[in-house]
Structure formats: C-alpha cells, structure tokens
Image (tube, helix red, strand yellow):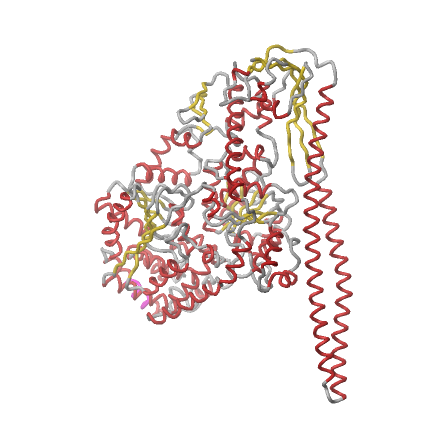
Amino acid sequence: MSFTRYHSKYLAHRVTLDGVDDDAFAKSLSTAKVQMNPHQVDAALFALQPPVMRGAILADEVGLGKTIEASLVIAQRWAEKRRRILLIVPASLRKQWTQELSEKFGLQALILEAKSFNEAKKQGHKHPFHNEGKIIVTSYEFAAQKEEEIVAVGWDLVIFDEAHRLRNVYKKGASKRAKALQRALKKHFKLLLTATPLQNSIMELFGIVSVIDDRLFGDETSFKINYGGKPTPASLAILRERLKPICFRTLRKDVQAAGHINYTKRIPTTFTFEPHDNELKLYSGLSAYLQRKDTIGFGGKPNQLITLVVRKILGSSTFAVADTLTAIIERLKKLEPVEPEDLSDIDTTDELTEEWSADADDDNGTEDAKVAIDPVQLKAEIVELTAYRDLARSIKQNAKGEKLLTALREVLDKIEEKSGLRKAVIFTESVRTQKYISELLSANGYDGQIVLMNGSNSDAVSQVIYGDWKKRHAGTDAISGSKTADMKAAIVEAFKNDKVILIATESGAEGINLQFCSLLINYDLPWNPQRVEQRIGRCHRYGQKIDVMVINFLNLKNRAEERILELLTNKFHLFSGVFGASDEVLGSIERGTDFVKCVFAIVQTTRTNDEIDDAFNKLQAALDEKIKAEVLDARAKLMGHFDQDVVKRLSDRKEVLKRVLGEFEERLIAIAKAELPEAHFYDHDDGSPCFTHNGHTFTTGWPLADDMNWRFFRLADGNLAQELVETAKARQLPICTVKFSYAAYPGDGQLSDVKLHIGKSGWLQVARLAIKTAKRNVEHLVIAATADDGTEVSQDTLDRLFRIPGEARMELGYAPPHDDLSKREALLVKAKLKEAEANNAEHLAREEEKLDAYAEDLEKAAEAEIKLLEDDIKLKRKESRSVGGLQDKLEMKRAIKRLESKRDDLRMAMFARRKDIRKDADDLLDEIEESLKVKPLVTPVFLIRWELAP
C-alpha cells in the first residue's frame, strides 16, 4: 500500500504554504546545503516575523554566520515569489555571496558592476537592476552611483553586508555614499548585517537605525539629548528596550553554552628572512622611484591606485616585478600613462579600482598625460626602469622563497602531529608570484602535489582537473553551469582529495571553503585587514576540526612591513585567539581601503626607520582613539543579552528544528512515492531517504548527495521536486473514498492521536486559506471533517492522517447529504481570521508605542532647548542686578527681552510642532492599520470519504 494522488495533492499544498512559523519556514530550511544552527534560524525568523517592520539589524558576533541567516531570509522570500532582492556588499565580497547562494541554497545571483551593467544595457535591458530571475549583488560604491536606477525598482528585500559602513549617515556633509543609499531605499524592507552597529559613539547607533526606520528615535538632536551624553544604566536600559524590536544579536559564548558550536583557535607563527643583496637593491631603488613626485611614468600628480598596485607587486617577489616594469616601459615609449589593465598581475585590481575611484580625491591621471614631456627626462627614466627590469630578471633566487622551502615541511609535520590533514593553502596577491612558488615547490619535492587558484585558471593542470571533474559530476547538482564557480569547485575537490598544496590569489579564493585544511601561509600580506581576515576565514570557519596554524613571513630589512605585521597582529588580533579578528578593532574602520590609504601614505612619504616608526605610532594612536574603553563598556551593556533565556531558547529551537525538518522531508518523500509509483525507494545506511528514477539517484540528505554524486531532492526552481509538487497541486481530483492503513505508516514511532480513530470513517474536505494583507500573506490548510460516530477530530490529527499510506478505493458520484462540512469549514476559517486579526492588533499596538516614543523624543528635545534658554534668562537677570551704569542696564534688559522672545517663539513653535508630529504619527498609524486589514481567500482542494483501517 502506498500514497494516493489525494495524499500528494494535500502534501504538495502543505509543503508550499506561505507563513512565518517554523512549519512554513521548513521549505526554505530544507533547500540549504548547510548544517543549520538554531541561532541562525532564530535570527532569520526574527527578521521575517513582524509585518509592519521596515527592517532589522542582525548583529551576531563575528563567526556565527550572519551570511547564512540572511540567506535563509532570501530563500524564504524567494519561495514566496517575492524575488526583487538586492544585496549591497563590499566589492571584495560580491563573488563570495553569489557562490554561497548558489552552492548552499541553489539560488542564482547576478553581480552588477560597470562592465556587466553596460553589457546588459547594450543587450536591450533598459533596467539591469530589475531582474526577477536572479538576485542582484552589487557594491556600495556602484549602488550609490546608480541611485536613480535603484529607486525605480520596487524591492522586496534589500540586504546590506558590513552595514557599519552606514553608521555615519546622520552626519551633515559626510558619508555621501551612505546618504544616497538611504534615500534610494527609504521605503523598502532592509536587513543590515554587522557585528559592530556601535563602534566609536552611541550616535552611530542612531545613524544605522535611521537607515532602517527614521521614526524609531526622534531626530539627531533629541537622540543626543536623551542618549548621547555619558551613558547611564538607566539610559542604556531604555535604549535596549527601544532596540529590541529591530535588533537581534547572538553572542559566541551563548552558542557555545548551548553546545551547538565549538570553536578552534588560530596559532600564529612568523618566519623571518633577509633578502639577498640584489633583491634589496631592486626594492630600494624602485621604492625610491615610486616616492618621487616628478616622474613621467606616474605623473606630477601620481595616480595613487596605480602606485599602490605596483608597490604590492614589488613586495611580492622579483619575478612579479620584471614583467610589470616591461609594461610600464612600453607605456612610457608610447607617451601614455600606466593604466590598471597593465597591472593584471594583481587579480583584484578591478575591485581596487572600483573602491578607490568612488572617492573624490582619487585622480585618474589623465591631466598628467597632457603635460609637455622633456625628451631627456623620458630617455633617462626609461633607462632607469630598464635597469631595474634587467636586475629583476637576473635574480634567480628569492630569500623568502628559500625560507618557504625550509619552513613548509616543518609546519606540515606539525599539522600531522595534531591529527590534521597534510595540506597547506598558500596565499599571494600576485599571479606571477603564484607561478614562481609553484615552480619552486615542484622542483623541490612537491611535483604533482600542487593546484593553483586564480582569476582565470588557464594553466594546463587546472584545465585537466576541470575536465575530469565535469566528467565525474555529469548530470548531477554539483555542476552549476557557471564556469568560474565550477572551476573553483573542481580545484577545491582536487585539493581536498589528492593534492597537498593549494596556491591561491585573492580573487581566486573568493567564496571557497577550506575547513578541511588547517595550515594557511601568507606568502605576502594585503594591507587591508579585512582581506587578511577573509583569507584566514577560508580555513578557520565552522566545520574546522583542529586549531589553524597561520604562517607569516617577515622581511627584516623592511621596517614598514614589520610595523604593518605588528599592527595586524597586536592591534587587529587577526592571527590568534578563539576566533581571530577583534570585533572592536576590525569594525572600527568603515572600509579596509581607509586603513590601506593610511599605510600607503606612510610608505610613500617616509624614508628612514625613525620616520616610519613615528608615522606608524601616530596611526596606532588614531586606532586606539577609536576604541575608547567607555564606548566598549557601553556597547557591551547595550548589545549584550537581549534575551536572558537565550541558551534555553536555543536548546528548544534545536528540537523544533529537528522535528519540522524531519516532517517536511517525510512529506516530500511521500509526494514522490505518490507521483512516481515506478521509482525504487529505500533508506541509505545513514538513514537518508533515497530513490532511483530515470537513471538517477535522489536523496533528501545533501551531504550524502554530494559524497555520492547523487541529486539533492529539495524544493527549488526547475528541479524534480518542484515539478512533482506543481503537478500534484494542479491535478483535479473527483470525490472518492480513501482508505488509510495505519499499519502501513513508514515513519519512526507511532501517531498516537491518529491511532485513536482506527476503525472510524466519515467525510473530509480540504481548502487552502490565504489571509492576505498589504504587508504579508499567511496561508493555512483548513480540513473540515466529520466522523460517522460524531467524534471530533482535531486539525493536527487530520494533518497527520495524510502521513499514513492508503488507497483510493472507488469514485463516488455524490457529495455528503448535509452541509455539516461547509459549516465546519466556515467556523475554522473564522477562527483563523480572528487569530490573524488579533496578531495584527498586537503589531499595531507595538507600532503605536513606537510612534508615541518617537513623538516624545522630539518633544523632550524641544523642552530641553527651552529650558536652556530659561536658564540663560535667569543668569542674565541675576547679572543685571550687579550692572552699574544705566546704559549697561538697558543693554542687559534688551538682551533678556530677546532671549524671552526667542523662548516664547520656541514654545509656540513647540506646540505647533507637537501637533504636527502627533498628526504625522496618527496618519502613519492609520496607514499601517489599513495595510494590516485581512482579506481572506478560500480555495477548495478536494473532497473525500475517509476510512482509517488498522
């Protein structure tokens, strides 16, 4: 006995209900290829629940998976067919987001930047941001440039990653980019992701909250008066309560206390080296050339970005420098300025260009190209650079490479001693240095054990690996169709299964997960601390089994490099600790490029070690100023526990999560059994349900699907599960007798409430109830049933009845002779509507409280201003008594009168403003109340005669 078409139609409707409870959320949870943690589900549900919110801040501490939380919200909105979704992220995280969404949630995203945007326009897409087939991912810089394009789209969901970049939006004359984004997205639901919503001042909290809802607090003045002074326990307590509806924060210690995640540590090691004489000569000479302001190659007003990239190449290896100098010399011969495309050796140059070009002080160097060029100087400069190029080519050995050779075997042995895999990922910023390292290691015992990862992966070894991978995974979900993503997947798989060493560039490693590797080597270091954190995060992440060893190299002849490493180690705490990167310091810089510019300014202007030390001491002092102790204390009190029972709640959530996912999986498999009677169903050794169909094996267990190259049976666009569900929902079914057989129930345990009704029969009709408002759509399956013996059967029991196999025995040509089912259905619908209206009334009451508090904030600020004037008037009156001369007394009285007039005007204005504020609040409340009015829609599903056999 199996499942009937009535089962599949009921269950297909059941697994696709819109809603905000755990059951409705299960369809999104079940699509994810990630081991979900309860705190992540909690955070996502927090963001999805209230229908009147304009957004939320997800502020979990670093390492708790805010990306997963946001992706769950995206997946839920996608499942609800609300697909105008925009992600605004740092440029360096765009690829990582697209790959995470694709690999873990089966959702396709499109990166929009200047090139792809213009290409879309050329292909006839008038509005490239309007694309309901894909999630749009773009950078802060590009989004701000395209304010008008973004305004034109009615977004269902907007997500800001690293949202602390917006925290100064409230400041006048500052943060133009943030202000543009705030304007463009004012009306849309926004999700802000940041571990540091409050960093340097409580006023930043006002800024970041105002991006979501400018009516949660009063204006800037009122916020300063109420909370902006020295924080007190009372003011912090009030502020916490005001934040509760909009801000969700989980702490690492709570998750660990609940037993859900155990973090490994970072173990730092530094290997020092001294460059050979020729290496030092090359570095010193070329560095001095880059510092000069009168060169033709870089112009009288040097392009900072170009100079920065050349410095990165210079610091990487002599092998990287040689070809770069050739490109610069060729430009000089053509009397052309150096362009970013000449520096493709650093494969993040495009991202750097986008980040730097957004700043007003960034110069593109075009003016310098028009300046008259002295042919004598030009010839001398070409000769100078050619000498450096020839010197670079003559250098066959690098001291840092030799140090890598001696250190690598030692650290690999240490990893094996700690029961880790004998694997190492080596990071470099330069593609040419990557090639040098590969050739060096291949010639010294590691031949055939190396894989590369960069922006193109055009080398022969990578192409072979990619070809083999495609053959092995042909016809499976592993192949995404994106060559870039699939190439990365092939390289990671080869590294995990066969190879010892992965040599990766920044761009190449974006979005990859290497938690099976616990040795990371920074052959050269980015100056951007956020990029360094991203590197380490490739290995030191959820799923890592042992402590991660982080290796850095230090050139003892380069004082600036020594101080940079010192800052990254001691100030940013990137290389050690339970989870590395200090929230306090890493979050203190809005953008990593800000820190890079500070370092760049130092290396461009200092020459002696004393000058270098003095400049870095000032930079460190500036960082110290940004993390004042009193601010950290206030943040700890303000952003700590919003819920004192968080550990218990997380434990309870884990059990609920296990239940709802288990039931969803059971329902999905039952649909497949009903719709695919010819398929072979069985349980794998690990308990995962599996079946074979049309030559393919499907399973609801994603780890098993990945390991076995099977297909992941999940409810997603365009796959088998979606096809079966839509077919079942659309099928018209006649009135029929369905006999359920309790003994045939395939699940674990018993359905004890259903068991009580064995031997009974009656009538049953199912309808889908959609309760729509302007803000959301919540659906229920209403099962109106009668039993022949008059027994009442609960909705939950009737729902579980359809988890029991049965058979459709005969088609009936008649409906029940009475209208009991219709009456029963009407009562059930009425109860659900009453419940929805009660929930909406509760939401409305909360919104009224919020708007009342907003009005009070503004009123308090006006009263405080009047009080200051009254205090000033009292002081002036007191002073007037001691004034001797008549003329002076008259002047004092006139001053007092002016203050009194100003005070009276303020009082009158305050009353008028109070009236306007209250009217605005009431109007907004009326608008919200109207948007919450429910509109029910009842759609019949089917009618049957039911029987429950033993």
Q: Residue, x 51% and y 51% (percent of image)? A: 194
Q: Is residue 27 magenta?
A: no
The correct choice, above or below, for 246 with respect to 948 in the image is: below
Locate residue 55, reporting x and y percent: 60, 47
User: Is 381 placed left or right of 19 in the picture?
Assistant: left
Locate residue 575, reporting x and y percent: 37, 54
Q: Which residues are magenta?
A: 379-386
In-front residue for pair 238/80: 238
In-front residue for pair 223/564: 223
Which quarter of the picture shows residue 279?
bottom left
Q: Main secondary structure of the magenta part?
A: helix
Q: How many marks?
A: 0
The correct choice, above or below, for 464 with respect to 828 in the image is: below
Locate residue 27, reporting x and y percent: 54, 32
User: Is 855 placed left or right of 616 in the picture?
Assistant: right
In-front residue for pair 612/347: 612
State whether residue 485 appears in this view: yes
The correct choice, above or below, for 150 with respect to 905 in the image is: above
Locate residue 328, reporting x and y percent: 35, 59
The correct choice, above or below, for 147 with respect to 76 in the image is: below
State whether residue 382 appears in this view: no
Q: Is the C terminus in the top left, top right, bottom left or bottom right quadrant?
A: top right
List the single residue furthest toward the left.
Answer: 444
Which quarter of the picture shows residue 207?
bottom right
